[in-house]
Amino acid sequence: MSKLNKADKDKLFNIATRLQLGTHWERNRELISELYTEHAPDMEMAAYWFQTSDAIYLTPQAETFFSSYFEGLKRGDLVQSETLQPVENLENTYSMTLKLGSQMLGMILVQLKNDFPLAVAEHYVEILLPQFMLARFGTEMQEEVEKRTSTDKLTGLWKRSYFNERFREESERLSRSREVGSVAIMGMDDLSAMVRMMPAEEQNELLEQAGQILRSLLRQTDWVVRWDNFEVLFYFPNTAPESAVEVFDRCVKAMARINPLLQVVIGLCSSAETTSARGLIQLADKRLNLARKDGRHQLVCFASKSTGLQFWEYK
């Protein structure tokens, strides 16, 4: 690399001392954009991650310059290079492979304006890369750990993926035994309807409170799963639907007391109707939609041997 003048050395030192990247990528992007706008305004930069096939635009005009290129990017375009090399069909643009050890994580694109020297630009890229790559690697490890854990971080309820793995085995056990278990899906439809008008922090606080209430009121043997953003799935072992309706009485009233937006509707079925894991979930979902169509709040739709399909409204 070429020798730098004092002004560039001072700018690089300023970037190095202020650059503190972590796994929060919006903050990372904002900090990089601020530093490079201040000290290297004639550089536009963006990164592309191979594993997820997504881009992050690091400087103010980067998306304007690079979005079309990333949209048309093909595997054959991913040239491996440890130094900045010209990008075909993009004027004054260079690419470089992003590696951590021997692992390739992505590529960085740099466009230079106003005759900014490539040799100097290489220094500005090199000062960024160590923290940039460690932050990305840390993010991937964090996501992998998150996938492997059994509980949802916000609500404390089981994750859907964890439930699916265990429930297949449980449904096989139910098919071999005479035990009756119940499956239900609860929809927080009022909260879902307000999603565009509520701050994310307020939504998350209500979901967190709902998770705490459900965990505190249900038995340790009950399975409670964050099924979707505003839906919770339940599995009650050795519990008939009529008993599950009584269990929900406490939960439904407690949630509504926290906030009127936590009024819910519920679809409920049992393994007396089917022992198929998929069949139970589909039947609970079908009855949830029937409860929604009824239009009342705090309502559960279920079936019993004596009366067939019915609706129960919690007062």
Image (cartoon, rainbow, N blue to C red):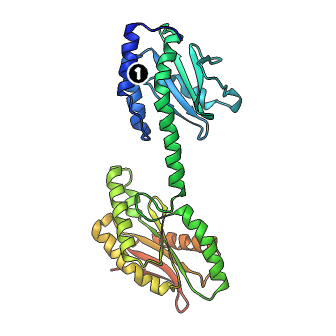
In which quadrant of the rendered image does the N terminus lie?
top right
Q: Residue furthest right?
A: 76
Q: Position of residue 263 (x, y in %)?
A: 36, 69
Q: Position of residue 262 (x, y in %)?
A: 35, 66
Q: Residue furthest bottom?
A: 306
Q: Position of residue 45 (x, y in %)?
A: 49, 23
In which quadrant of the rendered image does the C terminus lie?
bottom left
Query: Element under label 1?
Result: helix
Q: Position of residue 153 (x, y in %)?
A: 43, 57
Q: Is residue 294 visible?
A: no
* Count of number-bearing discs: 1
Residue nearest the viewer, comparing 257 with 57: 57
Residue nearest the viewer, comparing 58 with 91: 58
Q: Name the residue type under label 1.
A: Tyr
Mark 1 burial class by Cα count in 10 Å: few <14, some 14-19, many 20+: many
Residue nearest the viewer, comparing 37 with 267: 37
The residue shown at (42%, 16%) is: 40
Residue 212 horizontal side relative to residue 64, left or right: left
The residue shown at (46%, 60%) is: 152
Q: Is residue 120 placed above or below 236 in the rendered structure?
A: above
Residue 271 horizontal side relative to residue 241, left or right: right
The residue shown at (51%, 62%) is: 150
Q: Which residue is mark 1?
A: 36
